Amino acid sequence: MLDQIEGLHHVTSMARDANENNSFFTDVLGLRRVKKTVNFDAPDVYHLYYGDEVGTPGSVMTYFPFPNIARGQRGAGEVGTTVFAVPEGALPFWQARLEGMGVGGLGRGTRFGQAQLRFTGPDGDGFALVEQPGDGRAPWTGGGVGVDEAIRGFHSASLRLRSTGQTAELLRFMGYAEAGRDETVTRFLREGGNGAHVIDLEEHPGAQPARQGAGSVHHIAFAVRDRAAQDAVRRAIADTGYGVTRPIDRDYFWAIYFRTPGGVLFEVATDEPGFARDEEVAHLGEALKLPRQHEHLRPWLEANLDPIAA
């Protein structure tokens, strides 16, 4: 069993409109845009990162906004719900705030004894807020949400699968332990993790395969401290028979990827070097930052990418 994985690092999804996406995460949810860059494989598309003040692993939601992309189709083999942690007693504030801002899909529920507020993003993305007592992570309050209500980072992610058995086995190998069952949902917990250390597996035997598009999670990333830890994880995952990519330099972290038995794409990303490697903390997310291999495209990109509001 591995012991290097700390919890979630980031969750990456797809959207249709960059400005709408930016407004939702900064103006509505009160997160900070910590990086404005481009998709490494499609540099004519933004890659936007939102999180706490410095983009701490476990707090970062990222998006590829592809103009005119069709909306995704929900189904099996995807991340169904991304859940953010808020302080105890904060859900009434958030319900009133989201209702007042016209956010769709609002609904209250309970999972594993914790109250949840469910809602959808601009492209039908599945989100929830859950009260997490004693969460010591420092929130970003520059987005207009006070310290007593602001999002601390991720609480969990819920994977929607036809069968959970093989993915459950993989999570155990990755250092997670089963923490309980609630009807068709099995919860896994990384003891001593980074605060974003819960994964829920939802079993939907008759579900059709998901079709990715706007509002779909592209991949979910798990955090390790450094490249040595990542290399140990890579070797161990490969030794179990998974096809794992070589480490890829994503400028702000190193990444490896592999496809899980249920179809969800997993990434393992390093905590280092972080988002302040090419911008001062006070100005994170302001300038367009380009990977070295795409710097020669800057004049064209700055002329053709839609400007994003501050």
Image (cartoon, rainbow, N blue to C red):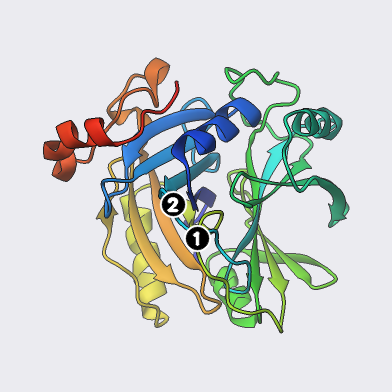
Q: Residue at x 23, y 36 (%)?
A: 301
* Disc number for residue 105: none
* Apparent side of residue 252 relative to residue 163 in the rendered image (left or right): left
Would you place residue 205 above or below residue 265 in this image?
Answer: below
Decide which of 74, 52 is in the foreground and name it.
74
Question: Dot 2 lies on which element?
Answer: loop
Residue 290 sits in quarter: top left
Q: Which residue is drawn at 38% across and 43% down?
A: 47
Pointer 2 local density, CA inside 10 Å: few below 14, some 14–19, many at least 20: few
Would you place residue 139 above or below residue 124 in this image?
Answer: above
* Apparent side of residue 217 relative to residue 224 in the rendered image (left or right): right
Q: Which residue lies furthest to the left in this view?
A: 296
Residue wearing tag 1: 213
* Apparent side of residue 153 relative to residue 63 in the rendered image (left or right): right
- Residue 281 drawn at (x, y percent): 40, 20
Q: Which residue lies furthest to the front in this view?
A: 68
Q: Name which residue type carries label 1.
A: Gly
Mark 1 or 2, closer to the camera? 2
* Apparent side of residue 181 relative to residue 291 in the rendered image (left or right): right
Residue wearing tag 2: 68
Q: How far apart are marks 1 and 2 (CA)?
A: 10 Å
Q: Residue at x 61, y 47 (%)?
A: 196
Question: Dot 1 lies on which element?
Answer: loop
- Residue 179 drawn at (x, y percent): 75, 63
Is the Cβ of the residue at disc 1 closer than 8 Å to that at disc 2?
no
Q: Name which residue type carries label 2.
A: Asn
Q: Can residue 289 be seen in this view?
A: yes
- Residue 101 drawn at (x, y percent): 72, 30
- Residue 195 drawn at (x, y percent): 63, 43
Quadrant of the rendering where the C terminus is positioned: top left
Decide which of 296, 284 is in the foreground and name it.
296
